[in-house]
Image (cartoon, rainbow, N blue to C red):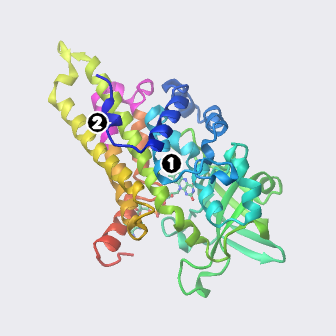
Amino acid sequence: MADTWRDDVRLTDDQRRVRDEIRAICAAFDDGYWRERDAAGEYPHEFVERLGEAGWLGVLVPEAYGGKGYGTEESVAMLGEIAASGAGFSGAQTVHAAVYNSAPLVNHGSEAMKEELLPRVARGEAWIQCFSLTEPETGSDSTAMRTQALREGEEYVVHGEKLWTSRIDVSDYLVLAARTTPREETARKTEGISLFLVDVERGIESGAIELEEIEKTVSGVVSSFRVTYDGLRIPRENLIGEEDRGFYHVLDGLNEERLVIAAECVGLGELAIVRGVAYANEREVFDRRIGANQAIQHPLAAAHSRVQAAKLYTYDAARRTEADRETVGARANTAKYLAAEAAFEAADAAVQTHGGRGVAREYDVERYFREARLTRLVPITQELALNYIGERVLGLPRSY
Ligand SMILES: Cc1cc2nc3c(=O)[nH]c(=O)nc-3n(C[C@H](O)[C@H](O)[C@H](O)COP(=O)(O)OP(=O)(O)OC[C@H]3O[C@@H](n4cnc5c(N)ncnc54)[C@H](O)[C@@H]3O)c2cc1C
């Protein structure tokens, strides 16, 4: 039976167009492609270049700057389909930041910055694949960041350390968050932070950016780094938006981005179920297909139900982002929480269905499982998503 249930959620005409075009591009990159890149720890350059040539890195760039001019609804369809194609969550992550870094530039960049950069992003010529926010000491409490960018004439000079800065090795530019006013001098902890566009090659060549790769067990296709900024000089015109208002500029697009992450989790969950069902239908033990056993069928059916529910919720939330700005945070955190849990359940069921082969690289479900585990940690942990829902939706006391 075909996996027609994957297309059951009703899409707009634009979403359908996006899904079909992305599906066609992804068809050229099979399971073996992703398996080999993951095992070798290699970035999928050919895949990202192909998306870039077709203009998909500029999905959120307005048409006036040469982009596709789409919004959250369409990027949900795009990244969700990439994950479901076999690329998984980490395949989607190879381009996720390239798509989402255009949001602060579009919304807050100067006209000169937009004219210079956005058409190149839209043509796939300039890669802004990296957002450097998390720090070793502060983690989820990101406004407690210590990295400082201090004004010296027409430049800012940056000192500090970031952890988990991903894809800096494949980025022409990165977006950096740093304190321009010390925390003690601001009324709110969300004030005093600014965003900067950083020329990566120049920073590394000058010796002011140093990288140390973090060895990790998941997402081989994306490298993550501890980054030391030691006297990095950034021209004043590379400030994105207003000085000291950078955290608010990030918040502007954060919920939309979280919805897209939820769609990537849904895509991963769908992928795991498709593979689990295929194996359950094919493998015979005790002279019958293992899928005939309810102990195999029910976990797959339960995971399918949860993935479908998460998909409906996520796509509905994406459709309502513009109309219901007040409550978009509640829906984005709920979608991310539901979708990551559903992806984990689906990947776990797929591994169990495969028996011992569930941990063999050649069957891929072990990779989906590692990735599904990661979705419960990034870009925010499930606990932090629940904190938001507890406090901001249910009106419970703030816990931190
Ligand atoms: C593979 C990977 C790629 C990443 N890429 C990037 C990137 O490109 N750029 C970037 O800036 N960051 C990146 N990150 C960082 C990621 O966003 C953080 O790891 C994540 O936000 C959690 O922060 P932390 O690891 O410091 O955990 P911590 O904040 O130290 O939390 C540890 C644990 O304590 C829990 N906890 C903390 N406070 C509370 C509380 N108040 N209530 C309940 N529970 C709490 C957390 O939920 C978690 O379970 C990446 C991380 C990974 C693993």
Label at residue 75 = 1
Q: Nearer the viewer, residue 71 or 331?
A: 71
Q: Secondary structure at mark 1?
A: helix
Picture coordinates of residue 388, whole percent (x, y): 37, 68
Q: Position of residue 210 (x, y in %)?
A: 73, 55
Q: Is residue 287 above or below residue 142?
A: above
Judge left or right: residue 79 versus residue 3. Answer: right
Q: Nearer the viewer, residue 270 or 366?
A: 270
Residue bounds of the magenta highlight = 345-365
Image location of residue 232, percent across then percent down? 77, 64
Query: Which residue is farthest top?
Result: 287
Q: Is residue 169 magenta?
A: no
Q: Could you tell me which quadrant the N terminus lies in?
A: top left
Tell me which numbered mark, 1 or 2, is placed earlier along the sequence: 1
Residue indicated by mark 2: 349
Q: Which amino acid lies under the numbered mark 2 shown in the image of this protein?
A: Ala
Q: Position of residue 238 (x, y in %)?
A: 75, 65
Callout 2 environment at 10 Å: few (<14), some (14 to 19), or many (20+)? many
Q: Main secondary structure of the magenta part?
A: helix
Task: Residue at 67% x, 36% y: name it.
Answer: 53
Eye-nearest disc, 1 or 2: 1
